Amino acid sequence: MTTLISQFEYQSKACAKLGSPLYAELLAAGARDVLDGGPCAAAVAGFEDEPRDAALPLRFMAAVHALVLSGAAPDLAAYYPSAGASARPYDLDAWPIFREVVIGQQDWIRTWLATPPRAPQTNDVGRAVPLLAGLLAAVDATPLPVRLFELGSSAGLNLRADHFHWRTGDLEWGRTDSPVTLGDAWEGPIPSWLETAVRHHPTVPVIERRGCDPAPIDPLSARGALALRSYLWPDQVERAARLNGALRLAESVPAEVIHTGAAEFLSKVDLVPGTLTVVWHSVMRQYVQVQEWKAVSAELDRLAAASRADAAFAHIAFEPQLNRDDRNGFRLTARIGRQPETVLSRAKPHGVPAFVFPDDRI
């Protein structure tokens, strides 16, 4: 129970830091409710010992958010901007209404928690900002048509990232008519290598896009779209707008996401002459068991060792530094061909904005 309370408190602080005052307050109140043995404790009972589930409070919040979005909690919807409420500072009246929803929807919430996906499924569209920067670096080094493979794809929305548009100041890249626009994508000076790559490659030809996930979501289904929306924090309307645009893109840009683990998926990937094979992933490594990641690393080493000028390979990752201080942002790393891994930049956990830290490559 102590661990569960600390998880609620940790996620409350994280939401406060990352710009969700609504969730910061509701999670803090939820922590107190768990301590008191209230309805929040009853709703998550039995799920707290699942491996790697420090995100259980966020899954719980997503269950309630899904009720709001589906119209099953109209009184609470009055406090959720994602359901049309006016954006405003957190109102203390929301907590007792939230608590009543949890009391009345115990069975529904527990069913949600028991149904895959059991890890938070956002694969935030904003993370395309650092991922695309890494892709541009790889394409600038090896200008070939791209075969794009993603680990932990969720609904595969970022497999369509070459159809997004991002801008920062006078610099922009991608389709100007894209339904996904990522504004203020960079903070501070833009790395010179990125400016060069943007000039050289106003578009990137992606000829194949495939991903894998242990619990893939169908973005074209009503249930899949609800799940994706529910995991966003309801007072962050810009993230919701990006997601809605990406869902529209998914209707016209096909991408295959296979129900399998990352190592097995990579074992079937080989380099193809005349193409650049790119493997990328974002904020998924913490959900992968240690032995599984060792197998993934071996497959990445295999592909890197086989890389050559006419059949190239790149590994692009946007991940937190496990067991290390991430106050300077999550790292964007790139391993291009047989070269060693390089830190290209950093970004906030949801990908926007990206920025360069003094120790990174400039």
Image (cartoon, rainbow, N blue to C red):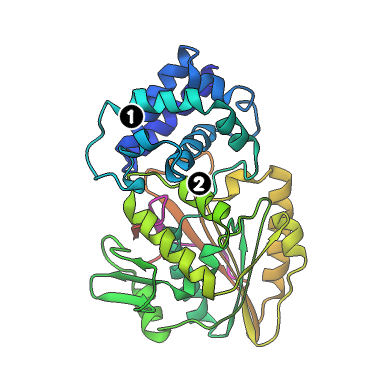
Residue 284 image position (x, y, % from top left): 57, 50
Q: Is residue 225 above or below residue 117?
A: below
Residue that protrudes farthest toward the top in the picture: 36
Give the residue displayed 44% in from the left and 83% down from the top. Answer: 203
If the image is split into quadrants, where does the C terminus sit? bottom left
As measured in the structure, the alpha-carbon distance from the residue carrying label 2 to the one carrying label 1 is 27 Å
Sooner in the amino-acid sequence: mark 2 or mark 1:
1
Residue type beneath disc 1: Glu
What amino acid is found at the position of numbered circle 2 in the picture? Answer: Gln
In the shown orientation, is residue 189 left or right of residue 330? left
Residue occupying the point 43% across, 22% down: 31
Residue 52 visible in the picture:
no
Q: Is residue 132 magenta?
A: no
Residue holding disc 1: 25
Residue 341 shown in magenta: yes
Label 1: few (<14), some or many (≥20) within 10 Å? many
Q: Residue 84: percent from the left, percent from the top?
A: 31, 48
The front one of 37 and 274 is 37
From which residue to which does the magenta span run? 339-351
What residue would you read off at disc 2? 321
The secondary element bearing badge 2 is classed as loop
Is residue 5 at least partly visible in the picture?
yes
